[in-house]
Amino acid sequence: MTEIYRTLSDVQISRPSVVTIGSFDGLHRGHAQLIRTVIKHAREKNAASVIVTLNPHPRLVLRPESPMLLLSTLEERLTLLANLGTDYVVVFPFSLEQSRLRAREFIELLKNHLNFVELVCGPNFALGHKREGTIPVLRDLGKEFGYTVTVVEPSPVPDGIISSTRLRELVAAGDVATASDLLGRYPMLQGNVIHGDHRGRELGYPTANLEIPDKKLIPANGIYAVRVRLGSDWFDGAASIGVRPTFGGGKRLVEIYILDFTRWIYGEELQVFFIERLRDEEKFDSIQALLDQMALDVQNARAILSHLPPGEPHVTAQPLSHVVRGN
C-alpha cells in the first residue's frame, strides 16, 4: 500500500530508495513509463520506490503572470500516482524560496529525507536554481552523495510527442480522443453537483451542474459522450460545456445529463470521463431546434457508449513510439 506524505519534512525513509521527481501533471503514459522503471529498479535493489511530486506546479510559482490550467488537481494526481503501486508518494511544496535552492542543496535535502541510492529521470531533466542541476552535474553529485542516475530514454509513438503541455492543448481544444490515447485513460472532471437555473429540467433534460476546482483545465465548449461515476455506480451520459448561447449566453457551465437517471444528487460528487466529442456548442434559432438537436446528441452518445463495457471506461493502449516527457 502506498504511503502518501504531504510534505518532504514529514517523511524519513531509513532503507535505500529509488526516486524520481517531477510535477507529473495529468500523469500521462510517458510519466507512467518512468515510474514503472522506478518500481522495477527498486525491486531489483530491495529498495523503496519513491515518487516526489512538486506542488504547486513550478510554472505557477515562477511565472504567475502567465496563468496555466492543469490536467489534474493535487488530489487527483496523488490518487493516480498511488494507483501505480509505488511505496511512497511525497509532495514537495514548491515556492520561490525552494526555487532558489542550488542543485547541491536540493540533492542534500532529498538525500537526508529519502535515503535514495538511484535517481531515475528523463533525458531533459534538471533541478535546482535556474535548472543548474543537469544530468552531468547530478552524476557528479552522485559520487559525493552515494547515488546513481538512470536516464530513461524516450520511447517512440506515432505522430508527435507525449507531454503535459501537448495534452493541455488537446484537452483545451476538445480533442479528448487523442488526449485519451496519450494519457492512457479518458480525460476526467470531478466536482460536486450544484444548483443551476433548472432550465434543463424544464426542457425535459435534467442536468447536474458541476462545481469545478480552480485551475483545473476544462475541455473546449461543446457536447460530449461521457461515462459518469457516482459513488460506486456507473452511468452513461452526455455533457454540455459552454455558455448556452441559445439563451443569451452567460457563465461557462459544465452540465451532465445522465441517461435513464432520476435520483436527486445535489451536493454529491461526480466523476465524468470524456469519451468522445460530439459537436461544437451552437446557437439555435428556436427552442424546438435545440430540443431536436439534444435528442440527436443523446442518441449519438448512446450509440458511442454502447460499445464500451459497463463500468469504468478503459483506453486500449497503443504501443509507445516517441515519447518526450513534459511538465
Image: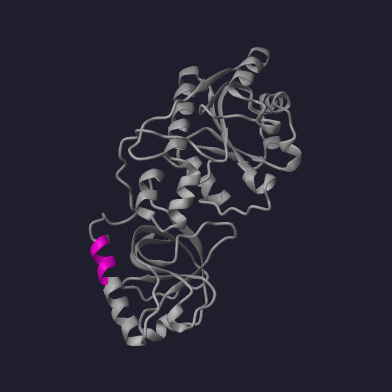
Give the image location of residue 131, x and y in percent: 65, 31
Residue 232 appears in view? no
Residue located at (74% from left, 32% from top): 101
Residue in the picture at 40% in, 74% down: 263
Is 291 rendered above or below residue 236?
below
Question: In the rendered image, is residue 79 in sight?
Answer: yes
Q: Is residue 308 left or right of residue 224?
A: left
Q: Is residue 167 left or right of residue 107?
A: left
The answer to whether residue 96 is left or right of residue 234 is right
Residue at the (32%, 71%) spot, across then down: 259
Viewer-proximal residue, 106 or 63?
63
x, y percentage for residue 14?
64, 23
Task: Please report the residue visible at 50 percent of the width from the left and 41 percent of the height from the top.
Answer: 81
Image spot of residue 44 (x, y percent): 46, 18
- Tell me where the magenta segment starts and ends, as one range: 299-304
- Residue 98 to residue 41: above or below: below
